[in-house]
Amino acid sequence: MSSSVLTLVGVSHHRAPIELRERVALDADACRTLARQLDGEAVVLSTCNRTELYLVRDEVAEEIAVETLTTLAGDRAEDLSAALYRHRDEAAALHLFRVAAGLDSLVPGEGEILGQVRNAFEAGSAGPFLSRLFRQALHAGRRVRLETAINESPASVPSAAAALAQQVFGELADRRVLLLGAGKMSEATARNLISRGAEIAVVANRTLAHGEDLARKLGAQALELDAVAAALEHVDVVVSATSGSGHVLSRDAVAAVLRARKGRPLLFVDLAVPRDLDPAINELESCFLYDVDDLEAVVIETLSGRRGEAAHAERLVAEEAERFREWHSSLDVVPTIASLRALAEEITDSELAKAGGRLSERERRHVEAVTSQIMAKLLHLPTIRMKEAAAAAGGVIYADVVRHLFGLGEEERRR
Amino acid sequence: MAELLVVPALLAYGEAAFAYAGELRGPGLAGRLATWGVRLGWLAQTALLAGQAASAEGFPWGTWAGSLNLFVWLVVGAYLIWGCTPRYRLLGLTVMPVAAALLAVAWAGGGTAVEEGERSGAVLAAHVALMLAGFAGLTLAAAMAALYLWQERRLKRHERGVLKVRVPPLEALDRLAARSVLASLVLLTLGIGVGAASFERGDFDAAMAVTLAVLAVYATLLVLRHEGWRGRRAALLNLVGFALVAIVLPLTHFAS
């Protein structure tokens, strides 16, 4: 790899604590502005877990990138220097592919990073090199998600709750959810369910005013906690995370509405400690109750599954990185191939011009077509061989030999 | 020569049955191998049935073993409608071992032989085909009911790996089992109707009585489901009905 130098400098959750990461974190606009300020091709990727600068330019790129991040870190510059990582060319490309595939994330295979890589690419100043690199990284990320089961299992308690709901009901479109409590945990779980098509029908809270705020945001009806038993008849999922003590729903209260539900299943998710829901609800027919410990156990189990899939994903990423390396290496011989073809065209044109007066228009077109075909066939194999040699790291030698044999560039040098 | 096609069919069904067990560890290669086993086995069995049909003068599956052969083909064919999708793949865990075992029994009983048989009437052929298709549907419904009970138990017990194995959603299993039962009841009713057309006084025997009992149990299931007997209760009733089909019906059939 010699034609372009790809440099990556960054910090991530692996070595930098949150206090340091938040210093160098940039929003979308700041990423765009910084990428424009850096000379040459530049993309800035900044998420809650990492800030990375991808640059394509001369040897001073690394210095510039380090300086940029150091400036952002301010009085934490010393800590930053210990946490920085730097990669070049193939190693930098492989790193980006792993990032896009979610293999460098805190939760292996998490899906959000792929969108963040795409946004960074779109906001950056990517030329031909970084465009190719990021497109292939996005492809690698998509491939990993399609060909492995790495992102199928839930990675958090709210997503485990939503996955369980899907295990009971299938598609969550038109499924109605009752939220007990209007805190952050309730909202996070509600958002996860909404993202899978569910509808938040009712929000019940001890303080009705707080419940109404959240209900308005989610387009739901607000109720006081005492009135929730009646609402059970028309919902499919109950998510509870109030901050009170004592059971909000008892076994008897749930049993009383089961007849009216005609056997339709009801999933209860109790995220509160102390628990809001009577554990005996799980004994009722068609009722499934999961508390926070049950959900955490599910998450731990599925995370181990993700790590198992990660080995398969690493193989796919390595394949994509190898493909990129081949493309990058081929850049060494592209100018020589272009010069060789230009020379061939020049000779053809010049010989045709000499014979031009002796040929009719029809004959001239015929001779032109024949000579073009001869040239194309003659140059086909050398072109292929040069690209193959480039992929095997011998491209520069081949290119030099071809340039010498055909005298490519000598004319320019004489001038 | 065509009779030998039972060997690849049996091997492929057997391979699928084993591979589906591998799918229990999580989605992956085992599941894909199982699905291909089902597909290839079903194609081999289709070719075998085609060979039997081409050689026979009339309906070649009139014997109990021949009927079993056709029955397995219908069950696997019906399963393939859902089994090809990853979400429903695990249904094969309950279907394919049964299919492989029944095909082996049909083979041992001579039901896969390709030979010229006696000419049988179109009414008998239609009757047998409709009844077998109906029973195939009930077998699938029972497989779904069994899978429902297994997954429901795992959910109730809060098993840690409950999301690791891809099982169809409970509601989908419940709904599809009910639909399969409904379709099977229609086929069985038609089959009984066609059979009754050729009855003579005194033909009524224990097998027919059990068939009507099967019909009654499943019809009751559908009515009760409408009244709220869904999920676990419906699955249990479904399995009771299938026990009649799988155990009582063959016994009475041989006895009569």
Image (cartoon, coloured by chain):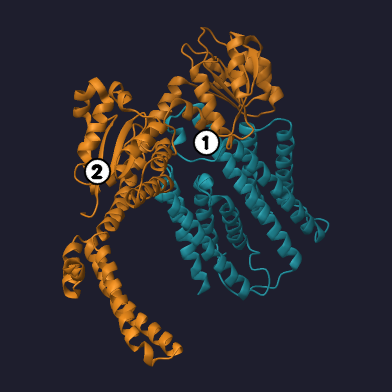
The answer to whether one can see residue A404 in this image is yes
Vertical arrangement, residue A334 with respect to residue A114, above or below: below
Query: Is A55 rendered above or below residue B161?
Result: below
| Circle 1 residue | B150
Give x and y (percent) for residue A124: 37, 41
Q: Which residue is mark 2?
A: A7
Q: CA distance from mark 2 to mark 1?
A: 54 Å
Q: Is residue B61 left or right of residue A159?
A: right
Whether residue B127 sits left or right of residue A255 in the image: it is right
Marks 2 and 1 belong to one chain = no
Element on which disc 1 rests? helix
B33 or A45: nearer the viewer: A45
For image coordinates 77% across by 53% down, the residue present is B204
Name the chain under label 2. A
Q: Nearer the viewer, residue A161 or A338?
A: A338
Q: Nearer the viewer, mark 2 or mark 1?
A: 2
Q: How many C-alpha atoms fall within 10 Å of the one at disc 1: few (<14), some, or many (≥20)?
A: few
Q: Which amino acid does the dot numbered 2 rest on? A: Thr
Task: Place residue A365 in its image quadrant.
Answer: bottom left
Choose top left, top right, bottom left or bottom right for residue A49: top left
Query: Residue farthest to the right?
Result: B201
Q: Quadrant of the N terminus of chain A?
A: bottom left
User: Is B36 placed above or below A293 here?
Assistant: below
> Which amino acid is tagged 1?
Trp
**Residue B42 location (% of width, % of height):** 53, 61
Q: Nearer the viewer, residue A19 or B249?
A: A19
Give me the chain that's orange. Answer: A
The local secondary structure at tag 2 comes to strand
Q: Look at the image and give the colour of chain B.
A: cyan
Chain on which label 1 sits: B
